[in-house]
Structure formats: C-alpha cells, structure tokens
Image (cartoon, coloured by chain):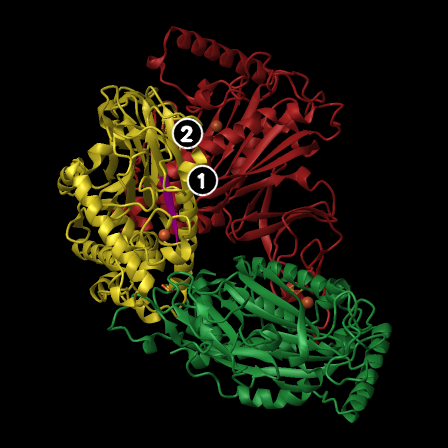
Chain colours: A red, B green, C yellow
Amino acid sequence: MSEQSRLSVKDLVARRKAGYALEAPFYTSPKIFRVDMDVIFGRHWIYVGVEPDVPEAGDAMAVNIGPSSIIIVRGDDEEVRAFHNVCRHRGARILPEGKAIIGNVVCPYHSWTYGLDGDLKFAEHMGPGFDPKCHGLKPVALRSVSGLLFICLSDNPPADIDDMAAAMAPYLAPHDIRNTRVAFQSDLIEDGNWKLTMENNRECYHCAPNHPELTIPLFAYGFGFAPDALDEDGRREAERYAELMRASHARWEAGGLPSREIEHLADRTTGFRTERLPIDQSGESQTMDTRAACRLALGGLTDKSVGGLSFWTQPNSWHHFMGDHIVTFSAIPIDESHTLVRTKWLVHKDAVEGVDYDLQRLTEVWDATNRQDADLVAIGQQGATDPAYEAGPYSPYTEGLVEKFAAWYIDRLAASLP
Amino acid sequence: MSEQSRLSVKDLVARRKAGYALEAPFYTSPKIFRVDMDVIFGRHWIYVGVEPDVPEAGDAMAVNIGPSSIIIVRGDDEEVRAFHNVCRHRGARILPEGKAIIGNVVCPYHSWTYGLDGDLKFAEHMGPGFDPKCHGLKPVALRSVSGLLFICLSDNPPADIDDMAAAMAPYLAPHDIRNTRVAFQSDLIEDGNWKLTMENNRECYHCAPNHPELTIPLFAYGFGFAPDALDEDGRREAERYAELMRASHARWEAGGLPSREIEHLADRTTGFRTERLPIDQSGESQTMDTRAACRLALGGLTDKSVGGLSFWTQPNSWHHFMGDHIVTFSAIPIDESHTLVRTKWLVHKDAVEGVDYDLQRLTEVWDATNRQDADLVAIGQQGATDPAYEAGPYSPYTEGLVEKFAAWYIDRLAASLP
Amino acid sequence: MSEQSRLSVKDLVARRKAGYALEAPFYTSPKIFRVDMDVIFGRHWIYVGVEPDVPEAGDAMAVNIGPSSIIIVRGDDEEVRAFHNVCRHRGARILPEGKAIIGNVVCPYHSWTYGLDGDLKFAEHMGPGFDPKCHGLKPVALRSVSGLLFICLSDNPPADIDDMAAAMAPYLAPHDIRNTRVAFQSDLIEDGNWKLTMENNRECYHCAPNHPELTIPLFAYGFGFAPDALDEDGRREAERYAELMRASHARWEAGGLPSREIEHLADRTTGFRTERLPIDQSGESQTMDTRAACRLALGGLTDKSVGGLSFWTQPNSWHHFMGDHIVTFSAIPIDESHTLVRTKWLVHKDAVEGVDYDLQRLTEVWDATNRQDADLVAIGQQGATDPAYEAGPYSPYTEGLVEKFAAWYIDRLAASLP
Ligand code: FES
Ligand code: FES
Ligand code: FES
Ligand SMILES: [Fe+3]
Ligand SMILES: [Fe+3]
Ligand SMILES: [Fe+3]
C-alpha cells in the first residue's frame, strides 16, 4: 500500500496487469478520483437520462455529475439542449437536481433570466457597459441515441458516438423509447467507487449466490461460464440455454428484430456492447414470474417473447429493453467511495398505473437486485481499502467483460494523461 | 479550475479582477480557508457578542471560532475579559460553547482552577517545582464598542478599532446596548463559505425575489439601484424613498440622532459602515407590520420612528438598531463550505416576554430572512464548486458594497501574505 | 501551530519534552495518524479479544483495526488463528465485524470458499491455469496470553511477547480466562485521538472529580499522589490505603496469588504493567457496593476478597481481573480524532444471567466510567485542536504512568522511523 501510494497515477496505469482486478488506489485514492472525474467523466459520453424525462417544450431536468450540474431542457423548437447549471452573474446553481417545468431559466438569486436556448434575456441593474450576449448559459454537448441522452462535458466530445448511434438504431427502434414514460425512478447511493459499481454490473458470476429474484428471468450463462466446471445438471442447463439462444436469435432476426452481439467494449473511445438475450420460462420480461409487467407493448412489437435487449456503455450505463418495459441505469460518481445508481423504469406512454401495470410488480426484480449489488459493492470497497488487499485474478470465463471494462478504463487514462 | 488550483494564493490575490466576484478557490479551497482563518479571523477584530451576554460578575460565555474557543467572562471588578478556552495542564477545553455562571474557571478534567482574571489559583499534585504564575489562562484581546464585543486572536490587534469605536459612539449611544437583554438567539449553519454569507449580506439586489417579509419594512433602494432601469412605478417609488431619506435624516439629526452615512468598508484594517435608514409604513421597526415589537423604548428614545441604524463591520458582522429592539448578527466560519450565522434579538432589559413583547412577532422577519439567505448561500456554494463556475460581474449599482467587501478582503490578504 | 505543522514527524519526535503532554500534531494530524497506524498498530501486539469470544471450532470473529479487518477463528483442531478478512479473488471483505459460526470461510461475492485454516478449497470458473494453493487467506500473527488474544499485523512480530506471556501466566492463571464467557460487550466511540484515550486510562488524577461510581471500589492512591499536598483527612486515608496494601499483598502472596507490581511500560517493545490492588469496603469487586456481581467464583478462587488484578499493555489495552468477573478493554483507532473503546465483561462460563448475576449490576460501574472518560477524551481532543494549545506538564505524582505511555510511544516511533 505504501509502495503503491508513492507511485504516480501514470506508473499505476503502466503496470496494470491484464486479467487482474485493479490495484487498490484506483478504488480508494481521492487523487485518482479527481483524475477519473477529469479524464473519464469529463471527456467521454456520459449517459444521463432519456428523452421522456423532458417530453415537452419547457420540460427541464438538472443532473449532477460529481461537482458539475447540468440542465437538460427541451426548447420551444422541440430540441433537447444541455447547459451548465451555473449562473453567469455570481455563479449560483440555478435549478435544484430533479425535474421542473419552466418558461425561462431564471436564477433564484437575482433573477437573471435565460431563454430555453441559454441566451441571457434579462439582467436588471447591470448598467450600460454590460453585454448580455457574453453572459449566456454555457452549453454542454448533448446527443440523443434513439432517445437515450448522453452528454459530454468536454469541448471536444469523442466523434465515435456517431458509430454507436448508427449501430444501435435498428436494435433500439422496435422499443420506441421516445414513446415511453418514466413510471418510476430510484436513486441508490452505493458505498463504493464507481468502478466497483461498473465491474459488478459486468458479470453474473455473483448472480447465483446473491440474486434470487433476478435469476428467475435471467440466465447467468449469458455472461460466460467454465464448461469443464459443470456437473451433470449444469451441463444439461447450459445446453438448454445454448439451444434457446440459437432458436430465439433465429426467430427474432427473421422477425426483423436485430439480436446478435455487437461488442466494442474495449476497442473504442465510446465503448459499448449489445445483445438480445432470451428470458427464462415465459420468455417475456424481467419480472418475478417472467410475464410482462405492463399490458401495453412497446413500439409496434407484437411478439410478447422478445427477451431482453441489453445495452452496455462505457463508462457508466446499462439498459434492458423488453417487450413491455425498459429498465435503464446510470452510475454517477459522488466521491472515491460513493456512487449514485439511478434506475428508471419506462413503460408505454399511454400506460396507466393500476390499470395497465402494477408498480410493485414492474420494479421489484431490479429494486431487490440493486440493493443486493449495493451490498457487494460496499464489501468490495471495504476490501480495497484494507492494506492487505491484493488484486486477484478475473475468471477467464465469467469475468471477461469485467476485464474489458478495466482494460478500457486503463486505456483511456493512458491515452489522456500527459 | 485546474489552472486555478495550480496557482498560489498569492497569484490568485494578485490577479483578482475588480468589479467581479472572486474566483472559485476563494470559496472552495481548504487551503485558502486556512489562510482566511489565519489572516482574516486570526488578525482582525471579530464580532462575537454583546455585553448583555455577560451582564454580571461571574457570567461567562464560550464562543468557538473555527478550531479556537474563547471564554468571555465578566470579572468581580465588572471588567469583561477574554481568554483562550484551553487548560494549561493537558489542554482540555474548559467550558462548553454557550453561557455559564461561574465563581472560578475550573477545568473539568483534573480541576485546575483559574480566577476570573485568568490566574491559576489551584492545581493539585504538581509538586514543588511547579510555578502557577506561568500557567494562567492565555488572554485574548477584547474590546467593547458601546457594548458590542469584539475580540482579536492576534498579539498585535489592529489599533484602528479606536477610530471605529469613537465614530460609532454617538450613533450607538441612543440605543443603550448595555441596558438591553438577549431575548432570543438563533444559530443557523449555512452550507457555504463565510465570504458568500458576507457578500449576501452586503446587497439587497436579491431582496425583491427572495425576502417577502423583510421587504415590508426595508427599502431595497438603500443599497443602490440603476435609475435608468426603473419603469414608471419604480421611478415613483424611488423618488418617494429619496424624499423620505431627506426628511428623516433632517428630523433625526435635528433631534440629536446622528444618521448620516460613515463609510470605511474598504479603506481601513477595521473596515465598517453605518447609516440610519428609514423604515416603510409606520417607520418604527423591522416587523411584519412595521410597528414596534416591544413596548419599552431603548435608551432614552422618545421618538418611535427612528428607523433602523445599520452597522456593518469587516469581516463578520451586521446589526440593526431600532427604537424598540436590536438585531445583531455574526458570521463564524466552520470550514470552507459551512458558516455559522448567529443572530441575537435584544430588547430593553426590563422588558418581559408575553407582556412587553411577543417573541414570535419580535423574531419572525429576520428568522424568515435568515433561512432565505441560507438557501441563497447554499446555491452560491454549489455553483462555486462547479468546474463551469466563472466569476461574473457585480452590478455597479446594487452590488457596490459587495465589491467593497471583496476589495477589503483581497487587500487584507495582500497585506498579510509573505 | 503553523511552526509545528511545518516540522517533520521525525523532528516532532526528536524534540519531545519529557514530563510534558505531547505536542498538538500527535493528536490532530492525519499524517501522524497514518504513521501511528503503520508503526504502532502495524508492528506491535494489539489486544483484540479473548478466547471465550471464539470458544468452539467454527466460532469466528471479525475485528476491524482502522482500515484493516482481521478474522479470528477457531479451527477444527481447536487452534485459534487469524487471517486478513480480504478475499483473494476481487478483494471483498468476507465477514462483517462481529461474531459468526461457520463451517468454512465463504466470500459472499462469488462464493470462493476457504477452510478454517485459510486454505482455498473451492473457486468456480477459474480455469485450468489457476492454482488454489497461491490463493489462500493471508495469515496474521496471533498469540493467546493465558486466554487474552493479541494479534500483530507485521511479518516480524516483536519476540518479547514471550516474556510478557511468561511473566503474566501465574498472575492470570487463578482467574482462568478460558473458562469464562462474555456476558456483555459495549462499543463506545470516543471523539478523540487514541493516545488521549490511553493517557486518560493511565491516571486517576481525574477520578475524584469525574468518577463517582468507580471511586467507590477503587482507590485513586494506587496511581500515585503528592503526599505534601494532603490535608489531615487525606493523610489518614492514604495511610489506611498503605496499610491495606501491605496486608493484602502479604495475604495474597501467602495464598498463592502473585500480586506485586511488574512494571515494563516503557522499557520494552511489548510494554506492560501489572499489580494486584485492593478494593475498598468489602474488598470483593468493582461494583457499586463493592460486593461480587456474580455468585460463581472464577478459576479455583475460594477467597472472595482478591481485590483487582490490573494489567495494562502498550499500546491499547487494560484489564481488571476480580474474583467473580473480569472487565477487559481495547482501544482501537478509527481516525485521528475518533477511537473505539471496546469493553467486555466476563463471568464464569456456567454463570446464568438473572440467576447467578444481574447484568445491570455487573456492568454499571464501568459503563458509567467509560461514558465519563469519553467526555474527558472529547474535551482533550477539542483542546489539542485549538491553535492556543500548549503541551503542559504532567504531575510527577499522579501522571507518572501517563509519562511512561508517552515515552514508550515516542521511543517506538523513534526506533521505527527511517
Ligand atoms: S447569481 Fe444568478 S442572478 Fe445573481
Ligand atoms: S487538563 Fe485541565 S486540569 Fe488537567
Ligand atoms: S471477491 Fe470473493 S469470491 Fe469474488
Ligand atoms: Fe448484480
Ligand atoms: Fe438577504
Ligand atoms: Fe477515567
């Protein structure tokens, strides 16, 4: 630990051992956390929400990312834009985190008034030498990927989001995100570094011992496994799963539902992966009985058994798109040992709670799973903080995507450090 | 932000741009906070309370300023003295914050016993080589300005407090602070740097949109405004105010009540400003109906409409003296992002609660105003912490006194840094 | 304070003035706290609990010391062993603090399974290249001193624990710790540096003004006093105590109970002191009426009036062994200004609550005393944090053992710093 703490971030990056967890300072050092906020969260595309968060002109949402706060607002021209949530007068934070319906962006301190396009429209008492044109809200790059909102705090956002957007469009289209509604949002603060949150998300090695609810609809096999290690029962289950995959993919692709894996987790600046995975039993949805939670199908989907299209992005999101609802997650760092996991459950925009869906049934699998994952992230952080911590080996079978996350992260630091 | 954080305090002081808010590190850096505690709060006169806090011999009050704790105590000779609240044996803090009635200053740990003059009177088991004379409480400079208590933690307190005391004496005398009583004290912790608390106090640009209660008795015009910017109604109001000022000042000065502005906010080590300002409607007091809250007049005042004598000091106080009561405020830094605002409401020492005054009516305007200001200070701190923060321009009309506070502060740092 | 904070730890160690409290940074600096955790708590024998905490095979207890967590577990061979509580896979903390009954040590994250001897017995999906032998739990040195458990986080634990164990064996044997049971444990977090907790423990100068309960059974004289300072009453009391000591020691030693002082607090790496001290009135136990709290005598003791055998170790424990029960304390640093004091009350293993002892009566003296000491430690920390703090002189009579603690501490730092 003391040797590590004497090493520079650059040295720690350089000596990272592939196939092994990261060394402790990556999870515990406030200095590396600041590097993460600067390099990773300051210069990459960060998933922050969905277009249905701001469905109409004048709908606004403030999202905090570490010390930064961003206003996302739909203008009178129906465009969604993002701005720094910092008044150009004496710098007050203008909107509190959460949603608002507004005519203008008005600072509560001295009422400086900005249009929905960020221009300063009104500032009293500033005298004749003052130029409102130089005091508009500072814009933030924003991109909607089929209705999923990504922002980038850098002035040079990575251009390869175009490739991701193009590749994902046919996968996402059938679920028609823009015609959904946020039925519920949960904010859960995990007591761990954001990378522990992400690593936890990238494997299902921990599912069997920890997620009794999630493993009803979800097959852990989708995340890799060691075939030799299986017993008789295990082998039979794995074969059943392989056959189901083959049959489902054939049926979905034939029916115009792109399903095959696209995997660019570690070979791009804007890393991502997608694949449509079968669901167990009825095959419909990630619920306790695997049946759809909402009676209204998303988009034009007529097949109820479309499994779950999963979509993962570096550095901070994962999503499951089913036939009846969508669950979408963002991980937002708070400090080196705390991370906000924000989960939104989306249903068809015309779905009525209590009529078309029951909120409890809709949310219970992932609500329980999130809490279980939070406990795992917490013991991961405690362990990383222990001077006896030593980065151990990833399973080559069940932790391949964790390795891809770690490799992407190290690669991005290496590319950005001076 | 990263450029700024690489700059030294000295560089940041040197490049301060007049007429603009301070750069972010002045509000957010723990290092600059330590400089503030050393240079500003360690070497200037700090307002801590009033003589009526310790009206009689043996009355003591412990006040904490950051990591320092100070005992203020009235001795048997009726003198008020201040001492460091640190035992000379093993250093225990002797008195908890707040008030006490004591015969001696007795350390709770091993009962070392000091007189009200700080001398060590008794220390058991210390043996023959021990000299009690070398182990008295360490004194702290204290000065009563017509009953307002200022302390200075330095061994060389600024001498110009004499000028302030002399200038203020005729203004304060009519309100006879020494014959008042603390009817109520509120301690409110604001989530912001102490300089945001002070800047907020030095302007009324924010009053109209934020202080519905305070703007009943108080005219925002007293703090400056842009005449061109006014509409018809505004111009009429401003003229009414100007006329009221002229008439009131003439009447007050004629009646022996000094009222004219004295302004030394930025041109002295012990910066201050005073002015007697009219109150709206009945002209009596800062209450919801502008009528006196207490039936007993202060001092020998016979005129009920004496408006409010305001008194502001650098770095940490403001006060309003009316005919029936006094409201007095101190701002005490806690850390770089938290500040205690301590408010005391004083009434005539013979006034009886429930008979001569109603506590709710006495305190409601400033209690509400304090909470509103705390919210503004909090969003100011959130904004200053945002990497997108950029110091914006002060209004030349409504924020002239904020500029004077910032200029004084920068000046004092410049004079004190090596 | 600013001069001190510019000094290196080495300089502060070098200029320590014997007979005086430590300088402020030893109590307040996060940097010195890290040195303490490394040098003192990382390389010395730390008291963590008793064998009766893990009486049977499969009984485990996790103890946290700062950022380190240690599993103490009794194996199937009845041996007690200690391991780092950190999984060798991705480093999760395996057991939560506290006690558990286990068959194996199973990590909750991905179910890696270790035997009670630390060997990795099972790890799924790791593939053929993986060697379980290289991934066992990391061992921690553990030593049972007549049933008192000490661990050392260093790979080179000080060898002189052997001397302490040998010296203490005859003193501890009559109280037969291994045949006791933990009747109650209290965890109290004190708001002060661990050295203030220890200094507080090493003197009874503060007893008379602070411990009305403890001073019923305990004589403050046992900790030293200034004979000249006593009045008539005091001298009579001191003589009564001296006579009682003489008579008790003679009786105890004659009856095979070693009682004489052994004092190696400052002249050894593993510093300790012991002495059997008389108890007032009935002479039986540290209770409110000085009578035994438990009807079952410990070990083979037939004499009810065996006073209290006290045992103190550097850096973090103290213990009182009476005829009917044992009270045993460990101080565990949390950060530079917080310390956990863990107290265990032990009774004969066959004693039944409500029948043989009343829990309230058993615990009330030390429960009250602990709370009083926590208040004293808190004001000590507040004072040490005050810039006006100046290290004062220890009493040569009543604070001799405090000086020995400080001298040992400074000596150990001096020996360990490069
Ligand atoms: S800070 Fe926003 S209007 Fe003044
Ligand atoms: S610390 Fe005050 S008397 Fe000992
Ligand atoms: S971290 Fe312990 S089994 Fe994976
Ligand atoms: Fe999980
Ligand atoms: Fe205000
Ligand atoms: Fe004590």
- Mark 1 or 2, nearer chain start: 1
Query: Magenta-highlighted stretch: main secondary structure?
Result: strand
* Direction from residue A343 to residue C204 in the image, left or right: left
Which of the image's four quarters has the C terminus of chain B?
A: bottom left
Q: Nearer the viewer, residue C401 or C284?
A: C284
Q: Nearer the viewer, mark 1 or mark 2?
A: 1
In the picture of the structure, the residue carrying the numbered disc 2 is: A401
| Residue A23 in sight in this render | no
Element type at marker 1? loop
Question: Mark 1: few, some, or many residues within 10 Å (few <14, many ≥20)?
Answer: many
Badge 1 and badge 2 both on one subunit: yes
The disc placed on residue A192 is: 1
Question: Mark 2: few, some, or many residues within 10 Å (few <14, many ≥20)?
Answer: many
Q: Amino acid at mark 2?
A: Leu
In the rendering, at what x and y percent does residue B175 appear?
A: 70, 82
Q: Is mark 2 within 8 Å of ligand 4?
A: no
| Residue A4 in sight in this render | yes
Would you say residue B283 sits in the magenta stretch? no
Q: From which residue to which does the magenta span run?
A: C337-343
In the rendering, at what x and y percent does residue A103 appear?
A: 76, 53
Name the chain under label 2: A
When asked about the image quadrant of residue B179, the answer is bottom right
Q: Residue at x 68, y 59 (%)?
A: A107
The reply to whether the C-beta atoms of the residues labelled 1 and 2 are less than 8 Å apart is: no
Q: Is residue C198 above or below residue B218?
A: above
Real-space CA distance between mark 1 and mark 2, rounded to the nearest whole angstrom: 19 Å
